[in-house]
Image (spheres, coloured by chain):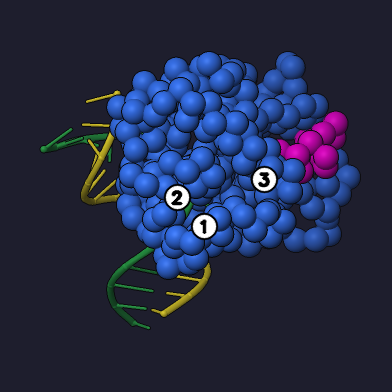
Chain colours: A blue, B green, C yellow
Amino acid sequence: MPELPEAEANRRRIKGQCLNRTIEDAALGDNVTYIELPGDNERGRLVGRQFTETHRHGKLIFAGSQSGPWICVHLGMTGKLLPFDSPDEPPDHTKFLIRFEGDRRLAFRCPRKLGWVRVIDSPDEEIERIGFGPDALEISEEKFAGVIGTTNGTIKGALMAQKKLAGIGNLWSDEILFQTGVHPETTASDLTDSQLSQMFATMRDVLTGVCETGADYSQLPRTWLIADRRAGADCPRCDGSIVKSKVAGRSAFHCDSHQQA
DNA sequence: GCGACTGTTGACTT
DNA sequence: CAAGTCAACAGTCG
């Protein structure tokens, strides 16, 4: 579950179920080669501490406290943070497991091992270190227009560039462009002020809308692309049809009628 | 069984 | 700066 709304749904689970409980243990799961996870010393730093607050920036999820330490989690393609209670067993493909006092547990499930977990001192420092741009739900319209409108590459690539704008990936970039009526290969710097303004509003609508459902796509309006995001599907907004292409190295889906190049 | 997908990013080359 | 390719991984689908 990898973009901003999915990260937000995972953050909320931690906030709801894993705060203010003393950590008794932090352990690695099975088969953890090739995946970045905290080492012995870093895991040891968590023991005896509590998470008292959470934070999210783009696709990154944080849990920690003012005095630290924090965990910083990236979900990759298939990562998920799953709180549960003993004696239930952790899910398959659990790579990192925190045991809180009492029965509460937090599992990081990550079958494809493209996600990671770090123990850090400060979310802001980590965001700075990685070099992420502003969070897509915190950026102002002016800064959005400045950052996106000056990119010489494709608009789809610009929306997905985490160092410009953090939080949007393949799926929701397609949705935003679909709803704004802009072709994914449009050169970003060719967009008009009006198009950028409309795209900013649509971006917020899409991201907040998905967040409100807890990233349950079945609850999203039928007029969105998401349910028909496959080659040959009828466009849910006009009499066009959905075509698949490759833009910025990713599979892109758009309507051949209301998203003209 | 094989090959080609897949919501991620990073390194590297053009 | 940006695009394209390859790489990392494992599950799923045809």
Q: Residues within 10 Å of mark 2 (few under 14, many from 20)?
A: some
The residue at the point 58 percent across, 36 percent down is: A202
Whole-percent x, y for residue A254 in the image: 43, 53
**Tag count in the figure?**
3
Q: Secondary structure at mark 2?
A: loop
Nearest to the observer: residue A60 or residue C14: C14
Q: Amino acid at mark 1?
A: Cys
Between circles 1 and 3, the one closer to the viewer is 1
Dot 3: chain letter: A
Nearest to the observer: residue A98 or residue A220: A220
Which of the labelled discs sits on residue A210, or is there none? Answer: 3
Whole-percent x, y for residue A144 in the image: 50, 22
Q: Is residue A71 visible?
A: no
Cα separation, mark 1 vs mark 2, equals 7 Å
Nearest to the observer: residue A115 or residue A204: A204
Quadrant of the rendered structure where residue A16 is? Answer: top right
Quarter of the figure with the C terminus of chain A: top left
Q: Amino acid at mark 3?
A: Val
Per the image, the residue denoted by label 1 is: A238
Dot 1: chain letter: A
Q: Earlier along the polypeptide chain: callout 1 or callout 3?
A: 3
Per the image, the residue denoted by label 2 is: A258
Cα separation, mark 1 vs mark 3, equals 22 Å
Q: Are marks 1 and 3 in contact (CB under 8 Å)?
A: no
The residue at the point 67 percent across, 45 percent down is: A210
Cα separation, mark 2 vs mark 3, equals 23 Å
**Up/down of A147 relative to A21, above or below:** above
Q: Are marks 1 and 2 in contact (CB under 8 Å)?
A: yes
In magenta, the rendered stretch is A8-24
Q: Are marks 2 and 3 in contact (CB under 8 Å)?
A: no
Q: Amino acid at mark 2?
A: His
**Up/down of A215 relative to A204, above or below:** below
